[in-house]
């Protein structure tokens, strides 16, 4: 295997891990493991879940003739906005019957991939290997044909959203269609992996599904070390007039430097790009 091919494989390792991690890639056939998240490894106990709020649940017997609900008042202040975001996401995670349409895309930005490696050829290979994701999940309370639960599909996968005011640089909400839209910007963070040890990107892991760098292998290339920087991550959630989450969008710019190994050969690469994830929820 030539140096160029090996380095391209190393780049693909990270990209596949990112995309597969955000789309529950443990079922996609790549040699990756996202069951255990090193940025927040332990699934929460039952008492970690947000308690149900009966005062905001829509009535089961609502009809078209029901008087329109009074517009919700958008929360003010960072703590109130972040709390409203967590509450809406975690409430959606508990849904037993819901349809979630999820899309994930990767946008590569120009940058040095590796000395001597043709950028155009590498990016072309990446585009062929990493396709956009467009998938609909139907969660059913009777368990039939239910491959995933809402808790697993919505970020962070398998656990409650626990973003805190200390995790963000800005958080605001504005009224829209009787409900409101929340926009949160996470603080810039760096994650690192070396010698089987992971430095956590705690703020991002509190609200997002993060890949496990210790499990990143592909094409015979084993990732040995990685430094991943997240800068400018934005979360946008839309709530309806009943306080239900109807759409959530994540934009996650990142840059990474990687060191990998192919048998006895070592190689390095640098990449940057943006992950965009959208989930639309409906009854």
Image (cartoon, rainbow, N blue to C red):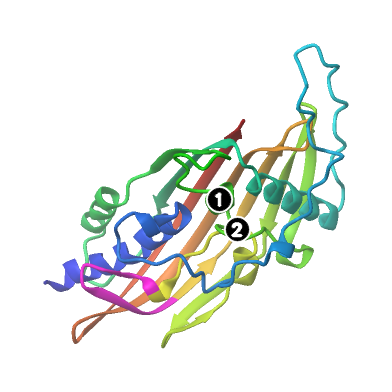
Front one among 102 and 151: 151
Residue 113 visible in rendering: no
Q: Quadrant of residue 194?
A: bottom left
Label 2 environment density (alpha carbons within 10 Å; few <14, some 14–19, many ≥20): some
**Which of disc 1 and disc 2 is earlier in sequence?**
2
Quarter placement of the C terminus: top right
Which residue in the protein does label 2 denote? 232
Residue 59 lies left or right of residue 32; in this view the side is right
Q: Give coordinates of residue 14: x percent, y percent.
A: 37, 65
Residue 120 lies left or right of residue 168; in this view the side is left
In the rendered structure, which segment of residues is drawn in magenta?
A: 215-226
Q: Measuring 75% from the left and 50% from the top, which residue is drawn there?
A: 87
Residue 71 lies left or right of residue 184; in this view the side is right
Q: Give coordinates of residue 34: x percent, y percent.
A: 44, 65
Q: Which mark is residue 80?
A: none
What secondary structure is the stretch in magenta mostly built from?
Answer: strand
Q: Measuring 17% from the left and 66% from the top, which residue is drawn there?
A: 5
Q: Give coordinates of residue 132: x percent, y percent.
A: 37, 44
Label 1 environment density (alpha carbons within 10 Å; few <14, some 14–19, many ≥20): some
Q: Secondary structure at mark 2?
A: loop
Quick check: marks 2 and 1 in contact, CB under 8 Å?
yes
Which residue in the protein does label 1 denote? 251
Q: Measuring 67% from the left and 64% from the top, which residue is drawn there?
A: 187
Q: Secondary structure at mark 1?
A: strand
- In this view, the residue farthest toward the top is 65
């Amino acid at each position: 295997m030539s140096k160029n091919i090996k380095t391209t494989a190393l780049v693909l390792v990270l990209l596949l891990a990112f995309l597969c991690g955000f789309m529950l890639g443990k079922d996609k056939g790549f040699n990756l493991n996202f069951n255990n998240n090193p940025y927040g490894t332990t699934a929460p106990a039952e008492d970690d879940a947000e308690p149900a709020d009966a005062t905001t649940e829509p009535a089961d017997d609502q009809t078209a003739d029901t008087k329109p609900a009074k517009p919700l008042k958008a929360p003010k202040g960072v703590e109130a906005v972040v709390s409203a975001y967590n509450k809406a996401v975690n409430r959606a995670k508990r849904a037993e019957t819901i349809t979630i349409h999820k899309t994930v895309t990767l946008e590569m930005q120009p940058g040095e991939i590796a000395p001597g490696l043709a950028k155009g050829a590498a990016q072309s290979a990446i585009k062929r290997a990493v396709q956009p994701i467009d998938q609909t999940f139907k969660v059913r309370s009777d368990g039939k044909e239910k491959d995933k639960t809402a808790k697993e599909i919505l970020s962070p996968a398998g656990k409650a959203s626990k973003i805190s005011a200390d995790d963000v640089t800005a958080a605001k909400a504005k009224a829209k269609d009787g409900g409101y839209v929340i926009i949160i910007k996470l603080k810039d963070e760096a994650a690192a992996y070396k010698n089987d040890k992971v430095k956590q990107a705690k703020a991002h892991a509190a609200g997002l599904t993060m890949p496990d760098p210790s499990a990143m292998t592909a094409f015979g290339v084993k990732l040995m070390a990685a430094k991943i920087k997240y800068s400018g991550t934005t979360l946008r959630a839309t709530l309806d007039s009943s306080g239900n989450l109807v759409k959530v969008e994540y934009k996650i710019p990142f840059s990474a430097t990687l060191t990998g190994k192919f048998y006895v050969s070592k190689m390095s690469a640098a990449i940057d790009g943006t992950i965009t994830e959208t989930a639309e929820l409906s009854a």
